[in-house]
Image: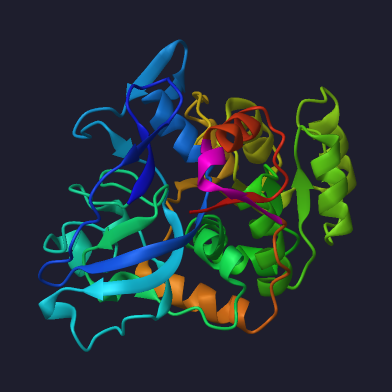
Amino acid sequence: MKRQAIVDYGQPLCEAVEPTPEPRGSEVLLRVRHCGVCHSDLHLLEGHFDLGGGKTLDVRAGRELPFTLGHEIEGEVEAVGPEAAGLVAVGARRVVYPWIGCGHCETCRAGDEQICARPRQIGIQVDGGYATHLVVPHPRYLVEAAGIAEERAGSLMCSGLTAYSALKRLGALAERGPVLIVGLGGVGMMGLAFARTLFPHAPVVADVSAAKREAALAAGAASAWDPTDAEARRAFMKATGGVWGAVDFAGAESSFAFAQGALRKGGKVVVAGLIGGSFSMPLPFLPMRAIAIEGSYVGRLDEAHEMIELVRGGKVPPLPIETRPLEAANAALDDLRAGRVMGRVVLTP
């Protein structure tokens, strides 16, 4: 098998050629056909997340190098372990739910594997899909996605699931008026598509990129705003009166400041992005404004199945996809880092 692997944090990926693994027990060997390139891959490659104020969160611990990134995976079952026989057929095309926990703790038993304290997430803690082959621990993490374009299907397990789960957290607030989507990268554009399908009002959006704002308007956003404009919040509140619900798909200081500042009293902002930074607010403002701030990390396995069915029904417009060969992984990461990607880049091993 071939893979593009981290050999040193902060350095380009290197190609490695190794024996193809054999599945054991309940494991499934997948021949990777498509693997999306996600912004969080950049943080893992760098070895840290930005916490603002010159502080960082080191994420190198517990990960042996060389390590393979990639968690937006679609592929073909090539072999199964003895305990997986009869649960999935060789030759079946599946997408991978990568947000795997220990499987035994109270959090996992409640169905929230994605926030398990002892995670085994594919492409995060264990080797991922920037490779020709991948071992998945059990067939339950393989999701059938027939009827969805194969180059699109894998990315739904990250950008799609993150967007879907974060929007669900707004609950009934989304029925009271347009929601605000901040950050129009791959996840934010998926959020726009889901919001148009799930909610009765066309969403409003904000992004620093004029091109992305224009793309969002063309995709059905009610209005688009530049959060770096000093007058944007005042103009936004004058035009809309504020929103009941907002989702920050960027997770940067400026994006969150705009998102929470755009709330009405009693509103909620959900933070799903991981760009980084910090935030502070005088504590009396929380009860005085009666706002809620909630984090959302990807989504549950049952939500993944719900989301796939919604997409399969043809109600969610497709995100722009650009396919590139596995050998172009470093160039794809560079383009993502520079903000040159509209939609998703998908590697084809």
Along the viewing direction, whichever of 286 and 130 lies nearer the viewer: 130
Q: Position of residue 176 (x, y in %)?
A: 71, 66
Residue at x 78%, y 67% (from the top left corner): 201
Q: Position of residue 270 (x, y in %)?
A: 53, 49
Q: Which residues are magenta?
A: 321-329
Q: Is residue 259 left or right of residue 141?
A: right
On the question of residue 77 being in view, the answer is yes
Q: Quadrant of residue 78?
A: bottom left
Q: Position of residue 296 (x, y in %)?
A: 45, 51
Q: Quadrant of residue 47?
A: top left
Q: Is residue 322 magenta?
A: yes
Residue at x 60%, y 29% (from the top left corner): 334
Q: Is residue 32 left or right of residue 244?
A: left
Along the viewing direction, whichever of 243 and 301 lies nearer the viewer: 301
Q: Is residue 237 magenta?
A: no
Q: Position of residue 13 (x, y in %)?
A: 43, 30
On the question of residue 266 being in view, the answer is no
How many tags in the picture?
A: 0
Residue at x 81%, y 48% (from the top left corner): 241
Q: Is residue 267 left or right of residue 144?
A: right
The image shows residue 254, relative to residue 218, as above or below, that is above
